[in-house]
Image: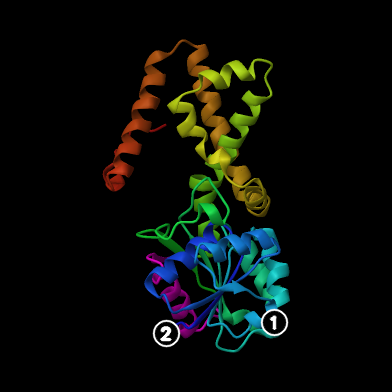
Amino acid sequence: MLKQVVIVGAGLIGTSFALALKRRHPGLSIRAIDSRKECVAQAVSRGAMDSGCSYVQAGAADVVLFAIPVRQIGAALAAIAPHLAAHTAVIDAGSTKQDVIAAARLSLGHRFPQFVACHPIAGRERHGPLAADATLFDGKKVVLCRSRENSDATVETARLAWQAVGASIVEMAAATHDAVFASVSHLPHMLAFALVDELAARPNAKLLFEHAASGFRDFTRIASSSPEMWRDVAMNNREALLSELDAYLLKVAALRNMLQANDGEAIYALMQRAQSAREHWLSGQFDQFNREDAP
């Protein structure tokens, strides 16, 4: 079905998308748009992209994927809008959706129905085309946030594009998406960044990091993620993230009060609930988790 694909952003997600497409459809034409010429060159050298191109040249592609920080998507959509062919499906890979949809509606004008907001639930802490992986999306979910203006045909093209890289589709309202991922994705990233920054600013930081082991490494792994990308996510999902931070601060304050009160039983109960919830989640049986003892 697809003959030409253009990817705006030759980073981890964009290059992994291209590698996955090439793995399954080696004859497919894939070109890149990225102001970082070295990233395009690296993606081409890996066999992910065939070449770089301009927005003018990109307009006739079957699918255009925007895999760039969410605060850059609006301007990039405005740049391609005058050149889009009527059949082109435009998709994104941003971690926030309400803001991206609003930007697309403003930037694309009458072409907005061709835009389908998407979020692949896949990634890793390393970024750039050299970190890309053809299997990154295998078995992963992609959240698709359909707009009322989208035609069934455009949504189907978006669906097929993600299925072509090994992903499965889950549809969700944009507001629901932003609330959900504020808690299970955006908040953990903020906490990891904050902890590393706090410890690194201490006078004895060298001593601390010399003795940090697997627990610290596991908790802070995502602090190696792209600061540019996650700054944009935080700012664009500000209200939902503030609510999640407030809820987490209340839980941390409650834990501090337990410790101050020397209440080992309460600390144990909290830890036991958390352990049970995580084990149920990992086993795919969270619906059987007993929440009766939760505060």
Q: Secondary structure at mark 2?
A: loop
Mark 2, Cα crowd under 10 Å, few <14 / some 14-19 / many 20+, is few
Going from N to C along the chain, the mark reached first, 2 or 1, is 2
Task: Judge whether residue 159 is colored magenta.
Answer: yes
Q: Measure how far apart labels 2 and 1 are at the Cα level.
A: 22 Å
Which range is magenta?
148-172
Report x, y in % for residue 221.
50, 37
Residue shown at 31% from the left, 43% from the top: 282
| Left/right of residue 219 with respect to residue 208 in the rendered view | left
In the displayed image of the protein, which residue is found farthest to the top?
Answer: 262
Label 1: which residue?
56
* Amino acid type, label 2: Met
In the displayed image of the protein, which residue is found farthest to the front?
Answer: 45
Quadrant of residue 266 within the rendered picture: top left
Which numbered tag is attached to residue 81? none
Residue shown at 41% from the left, 60% from the top: 137
Label 2: which residue?
1
Report x, y in % for residue 54.
69, 76
Quadrant of residue 187 within the rendered picture: top right
Give the position of the C terminus as an image quadrant.
top left
* Amino acid type, label 1: Val
Report x, y in % for residue 101.
62, 68
Q: Secondary structure at mark 1?
A: helix
Q: Tell me if residue 138 can be seen.
A: yes
Residue shown at 48% from the left, 83% from the top: 3
